[in-house]
Image: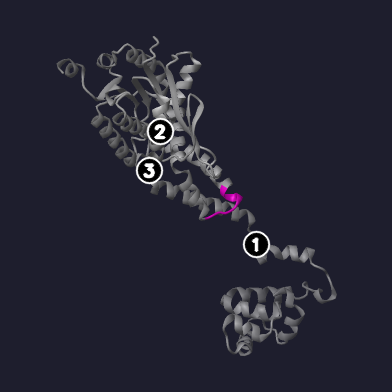
């Protein structure tokens, strides 16, 4: 597209609709952000005119097109900005190594994995097989050490202890371990 | 190009203003050519833009709205122009052009001593907003206005780059009072409104 024509069309568009564009931007941004977004939008619309003017005749028909373009631009700007601020969570599995390496090694956290590694892997396998809700209940009880009332409230289960007892029975059958409570108390950080 | 103080060539609007500055750089414009354009300010400030005549601010703090511009230009036109014949060059898409045309026509009706609508010749660039239906409506209204007032309108479909070489020829023809003949001789300038040469001779 002819650069002079593009500049003229852009000037006319901005002269006519700059207040309208700002009012749309103000619905999503405030303060100095309005100025920044308006400047970015001006560059965006200049380029858009260059690419779309000759191909898509219907696009420039009315204010509604401009409203849609401005709205979409604001939404993408919001996404960009929020994306930068968002904390990136690392899954528990991925962070396990880091927790092992960087957590404080006090007496409470001394774990002898080597001796019971088979048992641990059996428990982990059991946890991956049972429904997520059940695994969560077990983890809350033994990994995080939450009281039964708290678990009851969170998972909406009235008889939490009975429920856990049944799960433990299943676990005993699966792993063959008899003194499960002792084991869980000892290895509570590894479930 | 010859000089004629009774005539003025007015480049109205941003697109015409750009062309005028190119012509100036190339030394291809006469002294009786003027530019009239609107320059907006920062939209986040409380002030509106201004209207410039030959890079001189003549109206300040004017909103870019067709009706407002029309009213402001009406008052200015009464003081600012004394010439008898006008060639307005510009893009009919621009509100500045539309407002100025409407202003001069209504003024001419009010003040018989001023140039009358039939003394206005318009040379339109092919409208940049022609693709938009909203703007097509505005252009239809403008065509109706010039037709009603008996002005003569020509349109050229040349690109902006090609206009640099073409517009001086149009200005020459206007100054030599042979604009209609020129339009008949070339395919690049079409007369869309106004009496043809044959009609003028018959009349």
**Local SS, label 2:** helix
Q: Which of A87 and A38 is in front in this view?
A: A38
Residue that appears at 63% across and 58% down: A86
In-front residue for pair B95/A189? B95
Query: What mark, if any, has residue B46 been given in the picture?
Result: none
Give the residue furthest to the top. B2
Name the image quarter holding the N terminus of chain A: top left
Quadrant where the C terminus of chain A is found in the figure: bottom right
The image's mark for residue B75 is 2
Residue under pointer 3: A59
Specify the quadrant of the image occupied by residue A97. Answer: bottom right
| Chain of the residue where label 1 is placed in the rendered structure | A
In the foreground, B190 or A140: B190
State which region is magenta.
A28-34
Q: Are marks 3 and 2 on the same chain?
A: no
Residue B138 belongs to magenta span: no
Residue beneath the point at 60% across and 73% down: A128
| Residue A89 image label | 1
Q: Is residue B154 among what the camera can see? A: no
The span from disc 2 to disc 1 (Cα, nearest Å) is 66 Å
Q: Can residue A11 be seen in this view?
A: yes
Left or right for B181, reference B87:
left
Task: Look at the picture and state if A110 lies above or below A185.
Answer: above
Q: Which chain does the numbered disc 3 sit on?
A: A
Give the residue at x 32% y 11%. Answer: B176
Image coordinates of residue B157 in percent, x first then y, are 33, 24
- x, y percent for residue B19: 44, 23
Instruction: Characterize the local packing of mark 1: few (<14), some (14-19) or many (20 or more) Cα atoms within 10 angstroms.
Output: few
């Amino acid at each position: 597209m002819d650069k002079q024509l593009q500049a003229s069309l852009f000037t006319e568009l901005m002269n006519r609709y700059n207040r309208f564009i700002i009012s749309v931007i103000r619905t999503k941004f405030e303060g100095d952000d309005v100025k920044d977004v308006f400047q970015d939008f001006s560059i965006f619309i200049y380029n858009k005119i260059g690419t779309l003017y000759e191909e898509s005749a219907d696009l420039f028909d009315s204010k509604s097109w401009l409203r849609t373009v401005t709205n979409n631009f604001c939404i993408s700007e919001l996404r960009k900005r929020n994306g930068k601020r968002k904390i990136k969570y690392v899954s528990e599995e991925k962070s396990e190594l880091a927790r092992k390496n960087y957590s404080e090694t006090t007496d409470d956290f001394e774990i002898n994995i080597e001796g019971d590694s088979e048992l641990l892997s059996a428990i982990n396998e059991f946890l991956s097989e049972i429904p997520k809700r059940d695994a969560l209940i077990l983890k809350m009880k033994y990994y995080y050490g939450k009281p039964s009332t708290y678990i009851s409230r969170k998972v909406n289960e009235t008889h939490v202890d009975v429920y856990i007892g049944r799960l433990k029975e299943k676990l005993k059958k699966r792993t063959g371990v008899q003194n499960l409570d002792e084991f869980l108390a000892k290895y509570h950080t590894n479930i | 190009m010859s000089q004629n103080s009774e005539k003025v060539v007015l480049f109205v609007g941003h697109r015409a203003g750009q062309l005028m500055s190119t012509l100036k750089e190339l030394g291809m414009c006469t002294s009786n050519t003027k530019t009239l354009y609107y320059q907006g300010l920062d939209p986040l400030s409380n002030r509106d833009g201004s209207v410039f005549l030959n890079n001189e601010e003549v109206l300040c703090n004017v909103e870019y709205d067709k009706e407002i511009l029309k009213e402001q230009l009406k008052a200015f036109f009464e003081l600012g122009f004394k010439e008898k014949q006008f060639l307005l060059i510009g893009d009919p898409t621009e509100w500045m052009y539309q407002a100025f045309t409407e202003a001069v026509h209504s003024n001419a009706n009010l003040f018989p001593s001023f140039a009358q609508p039939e003394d206005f010749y318009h040379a339109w660039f092919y409208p940049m907003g022609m693709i938009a239906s909203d703007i097509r409506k505005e252009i239809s209204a403008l065509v109706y206005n010039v037709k009603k007032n008996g002005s003569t309108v020509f349109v050229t479909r040349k690109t902006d780059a090609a206009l640099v070489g073409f517009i001086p020829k149009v200005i020459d023809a206007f100054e030599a009072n042979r604009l209609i003949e020129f339009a008949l001789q070339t395919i690049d300038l079409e007369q869309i409104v106004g009496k043809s040469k044959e009609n003028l001779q018959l009349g």
